[in-house]
Amino acid sequence: MEIDQPLKAIQYQRGSLLILDQLKLPDETVYISINTGADAWKAIHTMSIRGAPAIAVCGVLSVAVELYHSRSKFDSISSILQFVTDQLNYLITARPTAVNMTDAAKTIIDYLIPLNNKQQNVTLYINELLDFMEQFLQRDLDNNQSIGKYGAEAIRQNVKDKKKLTVLTHCNTGSLATVGFGTALGVIRQLAVDNNLQLTYFTETRPYNQGSRLTAYELVHDRIPHTMICDSMAGLLMRTQTLHAVIVGADRVTANGDTANKIGTYQLAILAKYHEIPFYVAAPTTSIDLTKRTGNEIIIEQRPSSEMTTIKGINIAAEGVQVWNPAFDITPNQLITGIITEHGVFKPEELEEKLISLQRTIKSPLL
Ligand SMILES: CSC[C@@H](O)[C@@H](O)C(=O)COP(=O)(O)O
Protein backbone atom coordinates (compact mmCIF):
# COMPACT_ATOMS: atom_id res chain seq x y z
CA MET A 1 0.00 0.00 0.00
CA GLU A 2 1.04 3.62 -0.42
CA ILE A 3 0.84 6.27 2.25
CA ASP A 4 0.09 9.78 1.01
CA GLN A 5 0.67 13.02 2.90
CA PRO A 6 2.29 12.01 6.23
CA LEU A 7 1.31 13.78 9.47
CA LYS A 8 3.77 16.39 10.64
CA ALA A 9 4.28 16.99 14.36
CA ILE A 10 7.02 19.55 13.68
CA GLN A 11 7.20 22.20 10.97
CA TYR A 12 10.44 24.12 10.82
CA GLN A 13 12.19 26.62 8.65
CA ARG A 14 15.00 28.88 9.79
CA GLY A 15 13.51 31.33 12.30
CA SER A 16 10.16 29.53 12.64
CA LEU A 17 9.09 26.44 14.57
CA LEU A 18 5.51 25.18 14.69
CA ILE A 19 4.36 22.10 16.58
CA LEU A 20 1.08 20.28 16.21
CA ASP A 21 -0.69 20.58 19.58
CA GLN A 22 -1.22 16.92 20.49
CA LEU A 23 -3.42 17.85 23.45
CA LYS A 24 -6.03 19.06 20.95
CA LEU A 25 -5.95 15.96 18.74
CA PRO A 26 -8.01 14.27 17.46
CA ASP A 27 -10.66 17.00 17.68
CA GLU A 28 -8.70 19.97 16.36
CA THR A 29 -5.61 20.43 14.22
CA VAL A 30 -3.86 23.42 15.78
CA TYR A 31 -0.21 24.38 15.34
CA ILE A 32 1.54 26.30 18.14
CA SER A 33 4.40 28.67 17.44
CA ILE A 34 7.53 27.96 19.49
CA ASN A 35 9.79 31.00 19.67
CA THR A 36 12.01 30.29 22.66
CA GLY A 37 13.46 27.49 24.73
CA ALA A 38 10.96 28.43 27.43
CA ASP A 39 8.07 27.92 24.97
CA ALA A 40 9.44 24.47 24.12
CA TRP A 41 9.94 23.57 27.79
CA LYS A 42 6.27 24.30 28.46
CA ALA A 43 5.06 22.45 25.36
CA ILE A 44 7.14 19.39 26.31
CA HIS A 45 6.17 19.48 29.98
CA THR A 46 2.44 19.80 29.28
CA MET A 47 2.74 17.22 26.47
CA SER A 48 1.56 19.40 23.60
CA ILE A 49 4.51 17.63 22.02
CA ARG A 50 5.57 14.21 23.30
CA GLY A 51 7.35 11.05 22.25
CA ALA A 52 11.06 10.85 23.03
CA PRO A 53 12.51 11.74 19.58
CA ALA A 54 10.00 14.58 18.94
CA ILE A 55 10.77 16.09 22.36
CA ALA A 56 14.49 16.28 21.52
CA VAL A 57 14.02 17.74 18.04
CA CYS A 58 11.52 20.32 19.31
CA GLY A 59 13.93 21.27 22.12
CA VAL A 60 16.92 21.67 19.78
CA LEU A 61 15.00 23.65 17.17
CA SER A 62 13.52 25.96 19.81
CA VAL A 63 17.07 26.95 20.76
CA ALA A 64 17.87 27.42 17.06
CA VAL A 65 14.87 29.73 16.61
CA GLU A 66 15.66 31.76 19.71
CA LEU A 67 19.31 32.03 18.72
CA TYR A 68 18.37 33.12 15.20
CA HIS A 69 16.08 35.92 16.42
CA SER A 70 18.52 37.18 19.05
CA ARG A 71 21.63 36.79 16.86
CA SER A 72 22.38 40.54 16.82
CA LYS A 73 22.68 40.59 20.62
CA PHE A 74 25.68 38.26 20.78
CA ASP A 75 29.09 39.90 20.64
CA SER A 76 31.30 36.96 21.55
CA ILE A 77 31.59 33.24 20.87
CA SER A 78 31.64 32.53 24.61
CA SER A 79 28.30 34.29 25.14
CA ILE A 80 26.71 32.09 22.43
CA LEU A 81 28.20 28.98 23.99
CA GLN A 82 26.83 30.00 27.36
CA PHE A 83 23.36 30.74 25.97
CA VAL A 84 23.06 27.48 24.04
CA THR A 85 24.41 25.37 26.90
CA ASP A 86 22.05 26.97 29.43
CA GLN A 87 19.02 26.55 27.18
CA LEU A 88 19.77 22.91 26.40
CA ASN A 89 20.39 22.05 30.04
CA TYR A 90 17.12 23.73 30.97
CA LEU A 91 15.19 21.79 28.30
CA ILE A 92 16.48 18.48 29.68
CA THR A 93 14.51 19.19 32.86
CA ALA A 94 11.12 19.36 31.10
CA ARG A 95 10.60 15.59 31.30
CA PRO A 96 13.07 13.32 33.10
CA THR A 97 12.63 9.80 31.67
CA ALA A 98 13.24 10.13 27.92
CA VAL A 99 16.98 10.44 27.31
CA ASN A 100 16.88 11.89 23.79
CA MET A 101 16.97 15.55 24.88
CA THR A 102 19.99 14.83 27.10
CA ASP A 103 21.66 13.04 24.21
CA ALA A 104 20.91 15.98 21.88
CA ALA A 105 22.32 18.50 24.37
CA LYS A 106 25.53 16.49 24.73
CA THR A 107 25.90 16.12 20.95
CA ILE A 108 25.50 19.88 20.41
CA ILE A 109 27.80 20.89 23.25
CA ASP A 110 30.45 18.39 22.03
CA TYR A 111 30.17 19.97 18.58
CA LEU A 112 30.25 23.55 19.88
CA ILE A 113 33.36 23.41 22.02
CA PRO A 114 35.90 22.50 19.29
CA LEU A 115 34.08 24.90 16.91
CA ASN A 116 35.21 27.71 19.26
CA ASN A 117 38.80 27.25 18.20
CA LYS A 118 37.95 27.00 14.48
CA GLN A 119 35.49 29.85 14.05
CA GLN A 120 35.99 33.29 15.61
CA ASN A 121 33.41 35.22 13.57
CA VAL A 122 30.16 35.47 15.57
CA THR A 123 27.84 35.51 12.55
CA LEU A 124 29.54 32.57 10.89
CA TYR A 125 29.64 30.70 14.20
CA ILE A 126 25.88 31.15 14.63
CA ASN A 127 25.24 30.03 11.06
CA GLU A 128 27.35 26.90 11.49
CA LEU A 129 25.57 26.12 14.71
CA LEU A 130 22.14 26.59 13.14
CA ASP A 131 23.14 24.34 10.23
CA PHE A 132 24.18 21.70 12.74
CA MET A 133 21.04 21.90 14.86
CA GLU A 134 18.82 21.75 11.78
CA GLN A 135 20.38 18.40 10.85
CA PHE A 136 18.50 16.83 13.77
CA LEU A 137 15.31 16.93 11.68
CA GLN A 138 16.60 14.89 8.78
CA ARG A 139 18.58 12.56 11.03
CA ASP A 140 15.47 11.54 12.95
CA LEU A 141 13.53 10.87 9.76
CA ASP A 142 16.41 8.84 8.29
CA ASN A 143 16.79 6.86 11.53
CA ASN A 144 13.11 6.02 11.60
CA GLN A 145 13.09 4.83 8.02
CA SER A 146 16.06 2.55 8.73
CA ILE A 147 14.39 1.26 11.90
CA GLY A 148 11.29 0.52 9.82
CA LYS A 149 13.27 -1.52 7.28
CA TYR A 150 15.36 -3.45 9.81
CA GLY A 151 12.35 -4.09 12.02
CA ALA A 152 10.04 -5.27 9.24
CA GLU A 153 12.73 -7.63 7.98
CA ALA A 154 13.45 -9.06 11.45
CA ILE A 155 9.77 -9.73 12.09
CA ARG A 156 9.26 -11.33 8.68
CA GLN A 157 12.28 -13.57 9.22
CA ASN A 158 10.84 -14.81 12.49
CA VAL A 159 7.64 -15.93 10.83
CA LYS A 160 8.18 -18.69 8.31
CA ASP A 161 5.67 -19.02 5.44
CA LYS A 162 3.59 -16.07 6.59
CA LYS A 163 3.04 -13.17 4.26
CA LYS A 164 0.49 -11.26 6.27
CA LEU A 165 1.38 -10.47 9.85
CA THR A 166 -0.63 -9.37 12.86
CA VAL A 167 1.11 -7.26 15.48
CA LEU A 168 0.34 -5.35 18.66
CA THR A 169 1.71 -1.96 19.68
CA HIS A 170 1.36 0.39 22.64
CA CYS A 171 1.26 4.17 23.12
CA ASN A 172 2.08 6.39 20.14
CA THR A 173 5.43 5.95 18.42
CA GLY A 174 4.53 7.20 14.97
CA SER A 175 4.86 10.40 12.95
CA LEU A 176 3.46 12.34 15.91
CA ALA A 177 6.16 11.08 18.29
CA THR A 178 9.02 11.74 15.88
CA VAL A 179 9.89 13.99 12.94
CA GLY A 180 8.13 11.49 10.72
CA PHE A 181 7.47 7.79 9.98
CA GLY A 182 7.95 6.67 13.58
CA THR A 183 9.83 3.95 15.44
CA ALA A 184 7.61 1.01 16.49
CA LEU A 185 4.78 2.43 14.40
CA GLY A 186 7.36 3.00 11.66
CA VAL A 187 8.05 -0.75 11.62
CA ILE A 188 4.31 -1.36 11.33
CA ARG A 189 4.07 1.31 8.61
CA GLN A 190 6.89 -0.45 6.72
CA LEU A 191 5.09 -3.81 6.99
CA ALA A 192 2.00 -2.10 5.56
CA VAL A 193 3.99 -0.51 2.71
CA ASP A 194 5.51 -3.94 1.94
CA ASN A 195 2.01 -5.50 1.91
CA ASN A 196 2.93 -7.73 4.84
CA LEU A 197 0.48 -6.35 7.37
CA GLN A 198 -2.75 -8.12 8.07
CA LEU A 199 -3.71 -6.10 11.12
CA THR A 200 -2.24 -3.98 13.86
CA TYR A 201 -3.82 -4.10 17.28
CA PHE A 202 -3.03 -1.16 19.49
CA THR A 203 -3.89 -0.31 23.08
CA GLU A 204 -5.80 2.81 24.03
CA THR A 205 -2.86 3.39 26.46
CA ARG A 206 -4.35 4.46 29.72
CA PRO A 207 -4.17 6.75 31.54
CA TYR A 208 -3.41 9.46 29.00
CA ASN A 209 -4.75 7.69 25.94
CA GLN A 210 -1.91 8.25 23.49
CA GLY A 211 -3.26 5.15 21.71
CA SER A 212 -6.89 6.18 21.31
CA ARG A 213 -6.10 9.87 20.76
CA LEU A 214 -2.97 9.70 18.63
CA THR A 215 -2.18 6.24 17.26
CA ALA A 216 -5.83 5.88 16.25
CA TYR A 217 -5.61 9.23 14.48
CA GLU A 218 -2.46 8.19 12.60
CA LEU A 219 -3.70 4.75 11.60
CA VAL A 220 -7.01 6.14 10.35
CA HIS A 221 -5.19 8.96 8.54
CA ASP A 222 -2.80 6.52 6.85
CA ARG A 223 -5.46 3.85 6.24
CA ILE A 224 -3.39 1.16 7.99
CA PRO A 225 -5.54 -1.83 9.04
CA HIS A 226 -6.09 -1.65 12.78
CA THR A 227 -8.17 -2.65 15.79
CA MET A 228 -8.02 -0.79 19.08
CA ILE A 229 -8.17 -2.63 22.40
CA CYS A 230 -8.31 -1.50 26.02
CA ASP A 231 -5.00 -2.15 27.80
CA SER A 232 -6.71 -4.79 29.94
CA MET A 233 -7.66 -6.86 26.86
CA ALA A 234 -4.07 -7.73 25.88
CA GLY A 235 -4.05 -11.05 27.78
CA LEU A 236 -7.19 -12.35 26.14
CA LEU A 237 -6.00 -11.07 22.77
CA MET A 238 -2.75 -13.02 23.03
CA ARG A 239 -4.55 -16.13 24.23
CA THR A 240 -7.18 -16.17 21.50
CA GLN A 241 -5.66 -14.50 18.41
CA THR A 242 -2.49 -15.16 16.44
CA LEU A 243 -0.03 -12.36 17.07
CA HIS A 244 3.33 -12.47 15.29
CA ALA A 245 5.02 -9.74 17.31
CA VAL A 246 4.59 -7.04 19.91
CA ILE A 247 6.49 -3.86 18.95
CA VAL A 248 6.91 -0.90 21.28
CA GLY A 249 9.07 2.22 21.43
CA ALA A 250 11.46 3.38 24.14
CA ASP A 251 12.17 6.47 26.18
CA ARG A 252 15.48 5.17 27.49
CA VAL A 253 17.35 1.90 26.96
CA THR A 254 20.18 1.22 29.41
CA ALA A 255 23.48 -0.53 28.71
CA ASN A 256 22.06 -3.96 29.61
CA GLY A 257 19.01 -3.50 27.35
CA ASP A 258 16.46 -2.74 30.08
CA THR A 259 13.90 -0.39 28.56
CA ALA A 260 11.82 2.45 29.96
CA ASN A 261 8.68 3.01 27.93
CA LYS A 262 5.06 4.05 28.39
CA ILE A 263 3.40 2.61 31.47
CA GLY A 264 1.87 -0.74 30.56
CA THR A 265 4.79 -1.88 28.39
CA TYR A 266 6.16 -4.17 31.12
CA GLN A 267 2.92 -6.11 31.50
CA LEU A 268 2.70 -6.55 27.71
CA ALA A 269 6.25 -7.96 27.72
CA ILE A 270 5.37 -10.46 30.46
CA LEU A 271 2.24 -11.51 28.59
CA ALA A 272 4.21 -11.86 25.34
CA LYS A 273 6.81 -14.07 27.07
CA TYR A 274 4.08 -16.30 28.52
CA HIS A 275 2.40 -16.63 25.13
CA GLU A 276 5.74 -17.06 23.29
CA ILE A 277 5.25 -13.98 21.12
CA PRO A 278 8.42 -12.09 20.06
CA PHE A 279 8.67 -8.75 21.86
CA TYR A 280 10.60 -5.98 20.09
CA VAL A 281 11.69 -2.52 21.21
CA ALA A 282 12.17 -0.09 18.29
CA ALA A 283 14.31 2.91 19.16
CA PRO A 284 16.98 5.11 17.59
CA THR A 285 20.42 5.01 19.21
CA THR A 286 19.61 8.48 20.58
CA SER A 287 17.33 6.63 23.04
CA ILE A 288 20.19 4.44 24.32
CA ASP A 289 21.89 5.60 27.51
CA LEU A 290 25.16 3.78 28.13
CA THR A 291 25.78 5.90 31.25
CA LYS A 292 23.14 3.85 33.05
CA ARG A 293 23.85 0.16 33.62
CA THR A 294 20.32 -1.03 34.35
CA GLY A 295 16.74 0.18 34.36
CA ASN A 296 16.87 0.59 38.16
CA GLU A 297 18.87 3.78 37.59
CA ILE A 298 16.17 5.43 35.45
CA ILE A 299 14.03 8.15 37.00
CA ILE A 300 10.36 7.45 36.33
CA GLU A 301 8.33 10.58 35.70
CA GLN A 302 5.21 11.00 37.83
CA ARG A 303 2.37 12.82 36.05
CA PRO A 304 -0.46 14.88 37.56
CA SER A 305 -3.39 12.88 38.95
CA SER A 306 -5.79 14.83 36.72
CA GLU A 307 -4.41 12.93 33.69
CA MET A 308 -5.90 9.82 35.28
CA THR A 309 -9.03 11.13 36.93
CA THR A 310 -10.36 13.29 34.07
CA ILE A 311 -10.90 13.00 30.34
CA LYS A 312 -11.20 16.27 28.43
CA GLY A 313 -11.79 18.03 31.75
CA ILE A 314 -14.62 15.71 32.79
CA ASN A 315 -14.21 13.76 36.03
CA ILE A 316 -14.22 10.00 35.57
CA ALA A 317 -13.22 9.11 39.15
CA ALA A 318 -14.75 9.83 42.53
CA GLU A 319 -13.91 13.34 43.75
CA GLY A 320 -11.01 13.26 46.24
CA VAL A 321 -9.64 9.84 45.17
CA GLN A 322 -5.88 9.30 45.75
CA VAL A 323 -3.96 8.02 42.69
CA TRP A 324 -0.49 6.86 41.62
CA ASN A 325 0.39 7.97 38.11
CA PRO A 326 3.85 6.89 36.90
CA ALA A 327 4.21 7.73 33.19
CA PHE A 328 6.63 4.91 32.36
CA ASP A 329 7.72 1.46 33.47
CA ILE A 330 10.85 -0.61 32.97
CA THR A 331 10.87 -3.79 30.93
CA PRO A 332 13.77 -6.03 31.97
CA ASN A 333 16.10 -7.15 29.18
CA GLN A 334 15.24 -10.86 29.48
CA LEU A 335 11.73 -10.14 28.19
CA ILE A 336 13.02 -8.41 25.03
CA THR A 337 13.62 -10.41 21.84
CA GLY A 338 15.44 -7.63 20.00
CA ILE A 339 16.14 -3.91 20.01
CA ILE A 340 15.55 -2.46 16.57
CA THR A 341 17.85 0.50 15.88
CA GLU A 342 18.80 2.44 12.75
CA HIS A 343 21.96 0.28 12.60
CA GLY A 344 20.27 -3.10 12.87
CA VAL A 345 18.50 -5.35 15.35
CA PHE A 346 20.46 -6.28 18.47
CA LYS A 347 19.86 -8.66 21.33
CA PRO A 348 19.80 -6.77 24.64
CA GLU A 349 23.00 -8.50 25.77
CA GLU A 350 24.96 -7.39 22.68
CA LEU A 351 23.63 -3.82 22.59
CA GLU A 352 26.39 -2.12 24.55
CA GLU A 353 29.25 -3.74 22.65
CA LYS A 354 27.60 -3.02 19.27
CA LEU A 355 26.99 0.61 20.16
CA ILE A 356 30.54 1.18 21.38
CA SER A 357 31.90 -0.32 18.19
CA LEU A 358 29.58 1.88 16.09
CA GLN A 359 30.74 4.96 18.02
CA ARG A 360 34.34 4.01 17.16
CA THR A 361 33.72 3.47 13.46
CA ILE A 362 31.19 6.22 12.65
CA LYS A 363 33.01 9.51 12.92
CA SER A 364 30.01 11.80 12.29
CA PRO A 365 29.05 13.88 15.36
CA LEU A 366 25.45 12.83 14.63
CA LEU A 367 25.84 9.05 15.06
C1 LIG B 1 8.95 7.09 19.33
S1 LIG B 1 8.23 7.50 20.79
C2 LIG B 1 8.90 6.41 22.02
C3 LIG B 1 8.37 6.68 23.36
O1 LIG B 1 8.59 8.01 23.69
C4 LIG B 1 6.87 6.31 23.46
O2 LIG B 1 6.75 4.93 23.37
C5 LIG B 1 6.33 6.80 24.75
O3 LIG B 1 6.41 6.14 25.76
C6 LIG B 1 5.76 8.17 24.75
O4 LIG B 1 5.34 8.59 26.01
P1 LIG B 1 4.75 10.05 26.15
O5 LIG B 1 4.47 10.16 27.63
O6 LIG B 1 3.53 10.14 25.29
O7 LIG B 1 5.84 11.01 25.72
Image: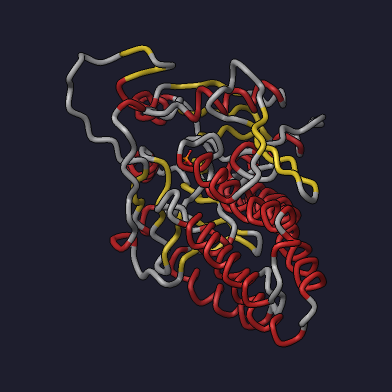
Q: In the visual, does 103 lie left or right of 332? A: right
Q: Residue furthest bottom?
A: 117
Q: Residue 127, percent across and down?
A: 80, 66
Instruction: Determine which quarter of the picture holds residue 12.
Output: top right
> Which residue shows up at 53% across the image and 43% down it?
51
Q: Quadrant of residue 126?
A: bottom right
The percent coordinates of residue 298 (x first, y second) are: 34, 59
| Residue 227 seen by the camera | yes
Q: Is residue 309 above or below residue 16?
A: above
Residue 340 in the image: above or below residue 126 = above
Q: Position of residue 112 (x, y in %)?
A: 66, 75
**Relative to 220, is 2 on the left or the right?**
right
Q: Is residue 36 above or below residue 232?
A: below
In the image, residue 133 sits, relative to residue 124, either above or below, namely above
In depth, the one of 110 and 317 nearer the eye is: 110
Q: Is residue 170 visible?
A: no
Percent across and percent down for residue 17 are 71, 43
**Residue at 34% from the left image edge and 51% from the top image edge:** 330
